[in-house]
Amino acid sequence: MAGGVDPGRRRIGLNLLWLVPGEVGGSEEYTIGLLAAVAAQMPSDVDLIIYANRRLVEAHAEVLTSFTTVVAPVSGSSRPLRILMESTWLAVRSRADHVEVVHHAGGTMPPIRLRPGLVTLHDLQPITHPERFGLLKRTYIRLLAPRSLRRAVRVVCLSRFTAGDAIAIAGVDPARLAIVPSGVEFDPAEPGVASVDVLERLGLHERRYLLYPAITYEHKNHRTLVEAFARLVAAHPELRLVLTGGTGGAEAALQERITRLGLADRVVRTGRIPAADLDTLYRGAMLMAFPSSYEGFGLPVLEAMSRRCPVVASDVGGLPEVGGDAVDLVDPFDIDGWVAALARVIDDPVHRSAMIAEGLEQCGRHRWSDSAAALVELYRQLPRTTVSVS
């Protein structure tokens, strides 16, 4: 036994200094959802030590208190400072904690490490679509991500699509890849009820509406949905479009398009909302539209289907894999195709019912408990010769 550590247990560090609540999109939902599922299983042979920034601890204390959580002396607001702390404070602290391997869940490993690293790859979009990112971020990812993936003892991917990019773009050995998808936990026999109070507060009670939960990043492609909705309301003037999520780089362009198309009184903007409110919006929506032009996975697809909300999504990235036969797929930039697909779900109750039933079946293949079990088993199977405790 070294430093009081039981050699029969796996001692894993989880680097979450990068996870700033409200700023990293679906990566936050995936990471927190997975941690909650791991906490529910509480494996007796794995110790997980979480290294987090102060904002993350404040936002998700209910999950993090299930683990040993070490708070870094940073708020998380400064990206350069977070990166610096990973190569200094985290490196030293993880060794002092007798961690075997550090799981870097944000897609890259810091240049300076005193412990072997495991990496979760969410996607390689800054490399495949650099025009959507600022010079600093795309340069940082291009220089660091492929090297991190090749040097990691294992690479966790959320989908087969992302795993394919890891092989083709970063040159990762397929034998070192593991798929740990996003998930949902739900009871298919429990329909759930939309909160009338929430719908009334948003002016949606007794109204039909479409939902799109996404930060206004460029690749989320709100413009296609808004253009399609503008045509759809000509035949369905009672419809509303509900856009949730925080503001990103495409916010100004979206606001201009909504105004230009005369949709200001038909588009409801909620901003970032509590999970309970989003749950109600899923349950009360006619459908969820997901026109993103790039997704490594697409957790909202599962979230919607588990609430009996049909989904029309783009036929790109990991979305076909996640949605399976339950989702109607459309080219992300085919506005006519989006109008037709949305109208079919709204106007054809038989088709809509079939989508709901198939969606519940598809969700049954993506449960958080299964994802958590896969991650814990991956920790258990890490080779001791690679991750020996010092």
Image: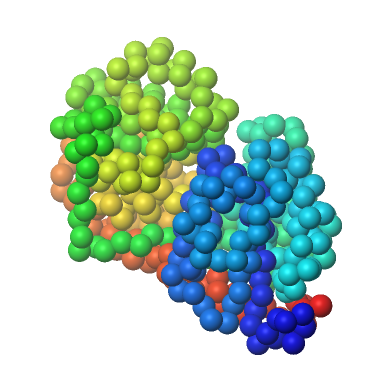
Front residue of 11 and 324: 11
Residue 87 visible in the shown view = yes
Front-lying residue, 244 or 338: 244
> Relative to 58, does residue 240 appear above or below in the rendering?
above
Q: Residue at x 40, y 13 (%)?
A: 259
Q: Residue at x 47, y 22 (%)?
A: 254
Q: Is residue 261 above or below residue 55?
A: above
Residue lying at 44% horizontally and 70% vertically, measured from the top left: 40
Seen in the picture, residue 91 relative to 329 is either above or below; the reply is below
Q: Give x and y (percent) for residue 137.
A: 72, 38
| Residue 231 shown left or right of residue 20 in the figure | left
Q: Position of residue 132 (x, y in %)?
A: 63, 33
Q: How many marks?
A: 0
Specify whether 62 is left or right of 195: right
Percent from the top left, x then y, of residue 107? 66, 54
Is residue 63 positioned above or below 40 on the image?
Answer: above
